[in-house]
Image (cartoon, rainbow, N blue to C red):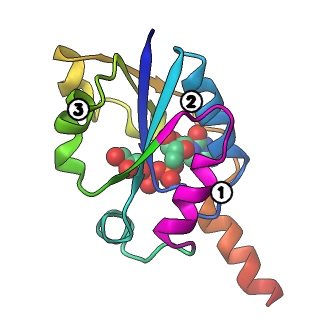
Amino acid sequence: MRRIITFGTYDVFHVGHVKLLKRARLQGDYLIVGVSSDELNFSKKGRNPVYSLDNRMEIIGSLKFVDEVFVEHSLEAKRQYILETKADVLVMGDDWVGRFDEFKDICEVVYLPRTPSVSTTEISEVGKEIE
Ligand code: C2G
């Protein structure tokens, strides 16, 4: 059994998120997803997510290719999360390339290409225009 872990905010869930999670699951047999808390997202992106943590967790937890979800409270706790979940592989989008290489001592680290031309920020901007 190969256990995969990945992390993200997954705000205003879109097809780029779906493709990333599907491809992450294909790296093994069991996919665990750390969903960033609202506070962590604020510290990463300088704004609150559009969807609350509860809603983002419910969406991610409903996907058939996701086996387990938990709250990611801190970027610094990544080593602890990987060890606690007994993950064999850490998968991240290539916007993070190189940033998690320090965990290669405890798991494989794989960066997958992002889906071009789709982002939460752009979707939110279009939403504002049609409001
Ligand atoms: N993603 C993608 N294609 C897009 C947009 C996002 O493949 N067009 C991927 C990202 O690369 C990431 C995942 O979808 O792997 C979730 O994206 P975000 O919610 O933007 O994740 P982020 O806030 O960068 O959180 O500990 C690390 C962080 O929590 C990552």
- Callouts 3 and 1 close, C-beta under 8 Å: no
User: Disc 3 and disc 2: Cα gap in Å?
Assistant: 27 Å
* Residue 121 screen position, x and y as percent: 59, 67
- The boundaries of the magenta stretch are 51-68
Q: From the viewer's side, name the closer residue of 70 and 119.
A: 70
User: As shown in the figure, which amino acid type bears the numbered disc 1?
Assistant: Phe
| Tag shown at residue 13 | 1
Which of the two discs, 2 and 1, labels the residue nearer the N terminus?
1
Which of the two discs, 3 and 1, labels the residue nearer the N terminus?
1
Mark whose residue sits in front, 3 or 1? 3
Q: Secondary structure at mark 1?
A: loop
Which of the two discs, 3 and 2, labels the residue nearer the N terminus?
3
Q: From the viewer's side, name the closer residue of 19 and 113.
A: 19
Q: Secondary structure at mark 2?
A: loop
- The answer to whether residue 63 is visible is yes
Q: In the rendered view of the protein, which quadrant contains the N terminus?
A: top left
User: As shown in the figure, which amino acid type bears the numbered disc 3?
Assistant: Glu
Outermost residue toward the bottom in this view: 131
Q: Looking at mark 2, is its residue's CB closer than 8 Å to ligand 1?
A: yes
Q: From the viewer's side, name the closer residue of 86 and 115.
A: 86
